[in-house]
Image: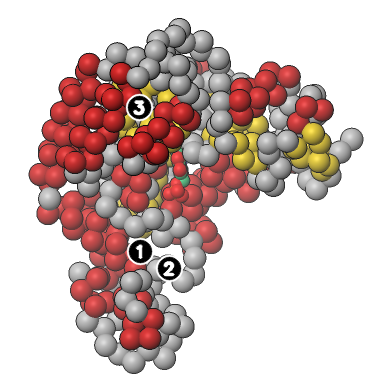
Amino acid sequence: MLLKKLKSNNKIPFHMPGHKRNTDLLGNELPFDIDITEIEGFDNLHNPKGLLKEVNRELTNLYHSKQSFMLVNGSTCGILSAVSALVKEGDNVLISRNCHKSVYNGIELVKGKIQYLTPSVDEYGIFGKVNPLEVEGILSTQNIKLLIITSPTYEGVISDINKISAIANKYNTLVLVDGAHGAHLFDFYENCKADVVVVSLHKTLPALTQCAAINVYSDKVDLDLLKNKLSVFQTSSPSYVLMSSIDNCIDFINENSNAFTEYKNELDLFYSKCKCLSVLKLLKYDDSGKIVVFCGFSNISGTELSSMLRNEYNIEIEMTSTDYVVAMTSICDTDYNFNALADALLSIDKSLSRKSFDKTSKILIPEKYCEPYEIGDNRVLSNISQSVNKVCCEYVFAYPPGIPILVPGEIISKDVIDLIDYYLSNDVKLYSDFDNMPDKILTKKV
Ligand SMILES: Cc1ncc(COP(=O)(O)O)c(C=O)c1O
């Protein structure tokens, strides 16, 4: 609907953007013809009354929410807005250590105090579900304003959101679900008991990069405040290309429900074809669309596996870790794609030899010296090897998945340095906010 209207817009554009939809001059490889600004008849994302309000209404239906809003700056801006709307300075926020860095950034911005859940780690070194009993233990003894859970995780682990939310409800704790990787699980959100769920449409649905949605499920969320925060964190020039992509994505889903059945069948076929893998192992978690290929029992690392797939089989993988890779799939994957991946894995598997798996714990929650927002500007650059017992002043993370190994305000222990060395020796790329990795790190000046 939005796209149709954009396509039929033939007004002479004495307005932004500066390309003026002049495809004769600029060519039509990029969508200049539908890239407009908030002109008459095309509504306004920050105060939607017409076309864009309708897209939000369709999102609300799709996600069974009380109110959904489209996002054009990814889940990142949804998480920043939700945290800012739900948390005040000094509030305690309980999060899983494996939360995305946007969660940490949001809490830092509002000067919240971070507390951690310790997610379990399975025999393959992968983060498990959030344990409702652990949540209850913490909420019953401490005053927690907001609980933030990542579900599904990058690897497809889904926590029992409704059970956890019921517990949180008892203690007046709000629940924000970072469902960035679960935009395709609409039915899962029916009767959702969390307060807010943020999803990245662009990750698992046919939508352009940055398209996302924030879904509100409870009356405990101040919608006006949330809208206000969305207008702080979202651009004041939202892209109509992205918004029409969201609109088209919803239409596609509504008109192609069979695509999900076919997708499920393709996945089933893929997993059954890969049953005879002998050294590589497929780990199937709750969302089987995240194909997790574990190579910890083999003589190659995750990095080597993804290089082989790239260089020898022309397959690019979403995420590479030390002992596994994640292939992210969607309804848009063809049977050609699934067959190519299965054939490649089967062929690589034949060339591998077996070894035992040494599960090095990759989850360390270092001792906290202060909150990230308390770090200030008093920083100095240190060599990693000489930073033991110093206070870290920047986030250190592997991307993807963007889960911090070190958070500003944490004390850099020998164990953390060993963990950094372990990642680097396994060719996992580490980043830090101020781009000092892998040799240096910002620490607090004493
Ligand atoms: C768990 C998780 N949450 C949030 C985000 C941010 O999503 P977006 O890229 O849509 O801003 C990511 C991105 O990779 C993620 O993995």
Structure colour scheme: secondary structure
Q: Residue at the spot x=22%, y=55% of the render?
A: 250
Quadrant where the N terminus is found in the figure: bottom left
Q: What residue sits right under mark 3 in the picture?
A: 292
Q: What residue sits right under mark 2 in the picture?
A: 238
Question: Which of the 4 image quadrants contains residue 240?
Answer: bottom left
Q: Type of residue at label 2? A: Pro
Q: Is residue 231 left or right of residue 312?
A: right
Q: Type of residue at label 3? A: Val
Badge 1 marks a residue whose secondary structure is helix
Q: What residue sits right under mark 1 in the picture?
A: 242
Residue 320 picture location, percent across and down: 46, 32
Residue at the extreme right of the image, as rendered = 446
Q: Nearer the viewer, mark 3 or mark 1?
A: 3
Q: Residue at the spot x=49%, y=70% of the render?
A: 236
Q: Earlier in the sequence, mark 3 or mark 1?
A: 1
